[in-house]
Every structure is written in structure tokens, then in C-alpha cells.
Image (tube, rainbow, N blue to C red):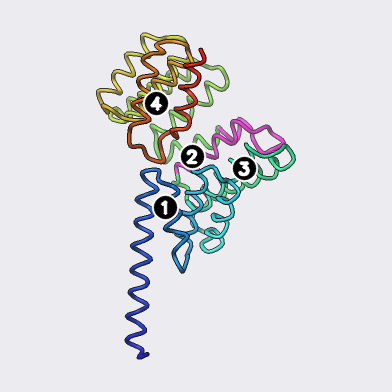
Amino acid sequence: MKPFTVFCVAALALAADSSELERARQLYEVTEYEQSLKLLKAMPSKDAAVYELMGRDYLMSGDFKKASEMLEKAVAAEPNNSDYVMWLGRAYGRRAETSNPFSALGHASKARQCFERAAQLNPRNIEALNDLLEYYMEAPGFMGGGFDKAQATIARIAQVDPSEGHWAQSTLDEKRKQYGSAEAQLRRAIELAPQQVGRFMDLAKFLYRQGRYQEAEQTFARAEELAPNNPKLMYARAESYVHSGRNLQTAKDLLHRYLSATISPEDPPKSDARKLLRQIEGS
């Protein structure tokens, strides 16, 4: 085969792989994880991007061991990619949550190391910083957690996104049972990002947890004005109703709407909505 012909064949193969990867990404974005994986597995050559997406597909499908294996390959190929390292941390985090106590410690340690590394590689990776914050707030000191580390991470988040920084501070304040400060931080987050529906959802859920139902409903209504028929908002309202034991029929209707909606990987999985429905039916 002539050199030019070889070049053309290679270029066509590369274009085909790129097209398949893009199609797999599109399937992932509408939570068709099995179909996305099917395309990726069939690709004859796999690079870091393919392994990373396979890892996310496995993670979202609940196969956390496979997820970590694929993401390890992605990180091995591109060790300085902050997002790849972050997703590997998430896979180990889920393994820690679902493993026996002996394995869980090792998986949790790897998760923390990945989150720290991801935030180091890209100090503006707000998702990695939030994952790191959650770890520091939830993990005991002997596993590398601690409120002092959480506070330092909040300062880093605030440098990247001031509104997100106030939200992050509110989570730590609520953890410390400093409810007045937590509420003030959430309201400040709204002032800085008045068009972000998530900021109103955060406040509404907080108010529901505090038993301030009328104020919470008013805040949910403001969120609805900003983003009508937003799936994440449907779920947030339903979850608040179920946990408070109020408006259960409305919660049921919202959950059925959620199950019929097109969601993204950023939304709660539909399996969680089904669990809430079972709680309503059992109440």
C-alpha cells in the first residue's frame, strides 16, 4: 500500500473513532450509559478520552470497580488531566461507600488523594474543590478529614466563584449547627447570582430542613419562575416534601413527572426518584 493511501486510511479511521466517541458522549449526556458503553467497547483503539468516558459510564451505572479500572487507565495516559483525576476520585469514593470496612479505608484514602491532586492540577476546578470540601467535612480526622481543612478549601472555592464560596460556607455552618450564619451565606449567594436557579433551590431546601415551610415554598416558587419544568427542581421539591412528610400527593406527582423527563448526568438518578416513591407508598 502506498504511503499516501496508508495516510488516508489512518485519517479515515481516526475520523470514525472521533465520530463514535462524540456519539457516545451524546448518549452519556442523556443518561443512556449502557448504549454509550456499547459504542466505546467496540472502538478498536482506545485513548485516554475513551477510557475516561467508559469510566464515567460504569460509575453512573453502579459498577464502581470497573469505573475505577477504566479511569486508572485514563489517568495513566494523561496524569496531569485534572478532570480525569477528579472522576477517578469519585469512583474510589463510591467504592469506599459500598465496600466492607477494611477495603473502605483504602478506597477513601485514594479518593481524597485524587481530589487533592485534581485541585492541585487545576486550582479553578470548582467541581474537584467541592468534592474535596465534602470529603473534608464528612471524613474523620484519622482519614484525613477535618473542619479546618474544609474551611481552607472554602477560601479556595470563593476565589474561583464568590457565590459558590458562600454556598460552601453555608454547608459547613449548617454542619456546625450555626443555622443563622448558614442562612445568611445562602442569601448572599443568591445576591451574587440572582439568575441561578440552584441558589434558590439551596435556600428552599435549607428552609424546609428548618421547618420554615411557607418561606421555603415562596423560594421554590421563585426558582420555578427562573426555570419552569426544571427536572432538578422537581426532584428537590419532591425530596423536601417526602423528608418533611408534607404534600405527599404533590411529591408523588412531581416524581412521576421527573421519571418521564429527560435528565442529564448532573441530575439525581431516576433510581433515587423511585426510592422516594416507595417511601411515599409505604407511609
Residue at the disc numbered 1: 36
Judged from the image, the secondary structure of the residue bearing numbered disc 3 is: helix
Give how far across and how far down residue 115 sits, in percent: 56, 45
Q: CA distance from mark 3 to mark 4?
A: 25 Å
The answer to whether marks 4 and 1 mark residues whose Cβ atoms lie closer than 8 Å is no
Residue situated in front as seen by the camera: 62 or 165: 62
Looking at the image, which is closer to me, 113 or 58?
Answer: 58
Question: Quadrant of residue 192 in the image?
Answer: top left
Cβ–Cβ under 8 Å for marks 2 and 3: no
Q: Sequence-wise, which precedes: disc 2 or disc 4?
A: 2
Q: Secondary structure at mark 1?
A: helix
Magenta residues (range): 126-150
| Residue located at (47% from left, 11% from top) | 245
Residue furthest toward the right? 102
Dot placed on the residue nearer the N-terminal end, 2 or 1: 1
The residue at which mark 2 appears reads as 156
The amino acid sitting under disc 3 is Arg
Q: Considering the numbered disc 2 on the image, is that residue within a helix, a strand or a loop?
A: helix
Q: Nearer the viewer, mark 2 or mark 3?
A: 3
Q: Look at 28% across and 20% down and name the residue there.
A: 222
**Residue reaching furthest front?**
281
Tag 4: amino acid: Tyr
